[in-house]
Image: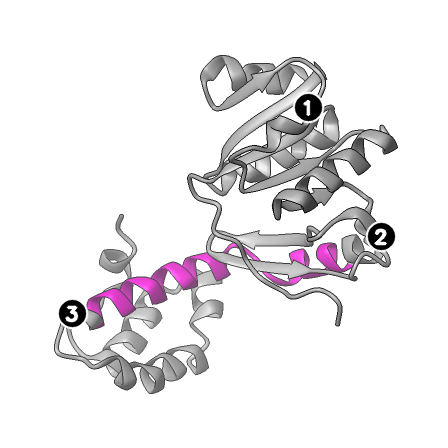
Amino acid sequence: MRYYPVHLDIQNRNCLVVGGGSVGTRKVITLLDCGAKVTVISPVVSPQLRDFANSGSIKLRVRRYRSGDLDGMFLVIGATDDEELNRQISNDADHLNTLCNIADRPEVCNFILPSIVQRDDLVITISTSGRSPAMAKKLRKTLESQFGKEYGVFLKLMGAIRKKLLSTSHKPEAHKPLFEQLIDADLIAMIEKGKTAEIDAVLFETLGEGYNFKELMQP
């Protein structure tokens, strides 16, 4: 296996996107969703990127890339159709030990971006190690049909239960069998069908008093 699977925490990290077209715009949206501080450099930019810049969501430099632009960056994404520029970005990143992804060019990346299925806190990533993006896309569509929004609700519920258990005298090692029981009770199907009363019955049977679906799901 060539690539080491990992989910990066880029919250408040400085990230650079070189390229302001449709591909660059998609990369920026994902970075912003993950809480990154995004800078975009490109002589031509999409209307959406201009809107982001005008609202203060990103920093925008309407010009060509320069090697010094990588200073202080945690990662860079090259989203241009200029092969010479893409290789320059890759070489500059390699010199600085900066994480670098060049869109659709795995041979000049030190990390690649997977296809993603997301249901709130549930994030499923699919990678073909750069061999077949089309296959990754097909698998993503298959998984999207299998995992609905109820999985995100379920994880929110489990997180609320875990937080409440930790606030009491429960020891972390005692939680595992409780969560296994909740998973085996098929709460996901109950959430999908909106069977709140049945969910509350399972919570009471497993955890005792004080665990109510509606209250646990409150912000």
Q: Residue 43, located in which quarter of the rendered image?
A: top right
Q: Report helix, strand or loop for mark 1.
A: loop
Q: Relative to 112, is 168 above or below?
A: below
Q: Which residues are magenta?
A: 139-165
Q: Report helix, strand or loop for mark 2.
A: helix
Q: Relative to 207, is 62 above or below?
A: above
Task: Choose between 61 and 92: the one closer to the eye.
Answer: 92
Q: Report helix, strand or loop for mark 3.
A: loop
Q: Residue at x 48, y 38 (%)?
A: 36
Task: Choose between 72 and 50: the one closer to the eye.
Answer: 72
Question: Three-letter amino acid code at disc 3?
Answer: Gly
Question: Three-letter amino acid code at disc 1?
Answer: Arg
Q: Mark 1 highlights which residue?
A: 66
Q: Residue at x 49, y 43 (%)?
A: 34
Q: Mark 2 highlights which residue?
A: 134
**Closer to the N terminus: mark 1 or mark 2?**
1
| Furthest-front residue in this view | 95
Question: Three-letter amino acid code at disc 2?
Answer: Ala
Distance (Cα) linking label 3 and label 1: 59 Å
Residue 89 located left or right of residue 97 = right
Residue 25 located left or right of residue 206 = right
Tell me the tag on residue 210.
3
